[in-house]
Image (cartoon, helix red, strand yellow):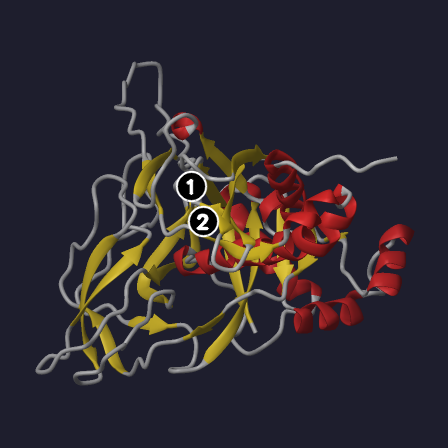
Amino acid sequence: MSNTLITSSMITNETLRILHNESIFLGRINRQYDDQFAKTGAKAGATVNVRRPVQYTVRDGATLAIQDVQETQVPITVDPEFGIDWAFQDFDLTLSIDKFSERYLVPAGRRLATELDSRIAGLYKQVYNFSGTPGTPPTTAALLLDPGAKMSDSIAPTDDRCFTLSPTVQAGAVAGLSGLFNSQSEIGNQYKKGTMGNALGYEFNMSQTLPTHTVGAHGGTPLVNGAGQEQSTWTNTMSLVTDGWDNSITGILKEGDVFTIANVNQVNQETKASTGNLQQFVVRADADSGASTRPATLTISPAIITSGAYQNVDAAPADNAAITVVGTASTGYVQNMAFHKVAFTLVTCDMELPKGTDMAARSVYDGVSLRFIRDYDVTNNRRICRFDILAGFAALRPEWACRVPN
């Protein structure tokens, strides 16, 4: 039977299928496809606003107490585009789609999946919940359960929870916990595949793309500089004025560093009762310290809110409240991550299809839009091809995720 000539649509659809199947994170996070660009195409720099769920306060008694509904959004910039470029000869289009896929599309789909996973894993810099001791792999039941408790304190649903481990941590966890599970099928998977499977309220998986975070060169006796630093309404970030750091240090704190403030405790997101645990904050931009009083103004998340529907702490920090940074200065830690599916979001947009090319197609599969273009290289008598993805990434509900470094 003769082979069917391979078309641009077949190429994009097959590559998207491979990409989706090979990705660790893609099927386990929130995915949104912005179809406003389905006709005209999007360009790098476009901004998409993704809504967060509304929160409310509860009335006491029978008297009506109408509250303003504050809808909150996380702006996501889809930029930059990324992709893969290669070339092949015309006669390759006479191959069967299976052979063409094996030769060209499987490697491309796997590499794109790895790149997507790497960029999604980089969202750890927006996550402030932190569990365990940096440098100590989470290989006991207690260490693996604690991130789930932190997520539950933030009212994360108990379904659709995942835990992505580095290869080293997974090996230690399987060895350390293999005798604790009763499910014969899970024990079989652990023995045959060396994987954790479903246990302890998570779907465990392993990723070789988990990033290493290097803590800033923090030092000194850092303190909050000025009482009353808080927000009255929800914002994605806020500024916190501090001092007491080591003198004139570049990178005193790095984006992704986590710290706590004395006597600023987390509250239950629904009841607003204090959990008794210090609220953890993440630095959202690199910060330097100055001279004299050694100040540093930090961009932090979450914003400090002490009342209303979006209250997240039981008190604003006092003047000279002590700041404690998590982790040893200038030391790197692999960022294992427990998260609920809605914690992170990926937004993709249809890219513009150029005119006058040999082939041009785009397809959408499970919220991911991929563009394929092929054109003729007259100099070298070959076909130049490119895949492009235009995507944006954000932590939509960062409180529903928890970092576990090792």
Residue found 27% across the figure and 51% down from its top: 237
Q: x, y (%) of residue 133?
A: 53, 74
The answer, for residue 15, to whether it is visible in the render is yes
Q: Is residue 344 left or right of residue 113?
A: left
Label 1 crowd bin: few (<14), some (14–19), many (20+), radius 10 Å: many
Residue situated in front as seen by the camera: 48 or 87: 87
Q: x, y (%) of residue 176?
A: 77, 71
Q: Quadrant of residue 297?
A: bottom left
2 or 1: mark nearer the eye: 2
Question: Mark 2 or 1 closer to N-term?
Answer: 1
Q: Which residue is mark 1?
A: 269
Q: Are marks 2 and 1 in contact (CB under 8 Å)?
A: yes
Looking at the picture, which amino acid does disc 2 mark? Answer: Glu
Q: Which residue is mark 2?
A: 399
Q: Quadrant of the N terminus?
A: top right
Residue found 42% across the figure and 81% down from its top: 328
